Image (cartoon, rainbow, N blue to C red):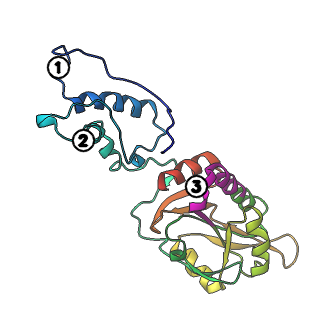
Amino acid sequence: MRDVYICDAIRTPIGRFGGGLSAVRADDLAAVPLKALMARNPSVDWNAVDEVFFGCANQAGEDNRNVARMALLLAGCDKLSNQPPSFKNTDLTGLDYAKDFALTDHTGKPRTLADFKGKVVVVFFGFTHCPDVCPTTLAEMAGAMKALGPQADDVQVLMVTVDPERDTQQLLAGYVPAFDKRFIGLRGTPEQTAAVAKEFKVFYAKVPGKEPGSYTMDHTAASYVFDRNGKVRLFVRYGQGVEPLVHDIKQLL
């Protein structure tokens, strides 16, 4: 026997035989409380509903059908899947760039975007010596993963270094997973880094430091989010905080 939990409840008007509701079909009447429940609980993923149970629903003559499922359709549940998601970050759906990369992760394994198909992927460009933007962004992503709970297992965060000269495999291995053990650091040769940055339309440049021979990196402070099919969907600007990122990732899960 399956467990049942009552999360909300509402009912139709109660009529009598031959009364004011006698001309209303059972499925039309049943759709009324379903619509009300959908309006009252907007955070519920109504597209995830896979069965509806009704009791004492008349199924005679023309109405000889699955009243419960018909009521769900009449309530508009079938239209929800056709509605585009409402994102809080910049929607890039349909744009023809940021299609792939060929880099090596912090364990030495070659990686492409296809390796993460089936997951929502967040790609950030940064470097380990970054004093502010990079650690702040990775900390926010770690906060988003925590907020997602079990759903975080279907999300992959990647940091691509724009400073391959200093960011060795070992340095990335100690830095990126420190924010969340599931995070992966990626690096390439200077040529590979330049090619990926061009594909993703990411700016980066070496900026001389105050000490002789020292430098820092100026770079695009934003992230890309890909859906489960590996298509770029979002551009997340720096400093948005955890909540908008969590909201948008949930739309893609």
Residue at 75% across, 74% down: 172
Q: Is residue 205 left or right of residue 94?
A: right
Q: Secondary structure at mark 2?
A: loop
Front in this rendered view, residue 57 or 252? 57
Residue 22 image label: 1
Contact (CB < 8 A) between labels 1 and 2?
A: no
The answer for how far apart the CA atoms under marks 2 and 3 are is 33 Å
Query: Local crowd at mark 3 within 10 Å, few (<14), some, or many (≥20)?
Result: few
Q: Earlier in the sequence, mark 1 or mark 3?
A: 1
Please tell me whether residue 140 belongs to the stretch shown in magenta: yes
The answer for how far apart the CA atoms under marks 1 and 2 are is 19 Å
Residue 66 image label: 2
Front in this rendered view, residue 22 or 114? 22
Q: Residue furthest left?
A: 61
Residue at 69% across, 53% down: 140
- The amino acid beneath tag 3 is Gln
The answer for how far apart the CA atoms under marks 1 and 3 are is 46 Å
Residue 131, located in which quarter of the rendered image? bottom right
Q: Secondary structure at mark 3?
A: helix
Q: Is residue 162 left or right of residue 60?
A: right
Bounds of the magenta segment = 139-157
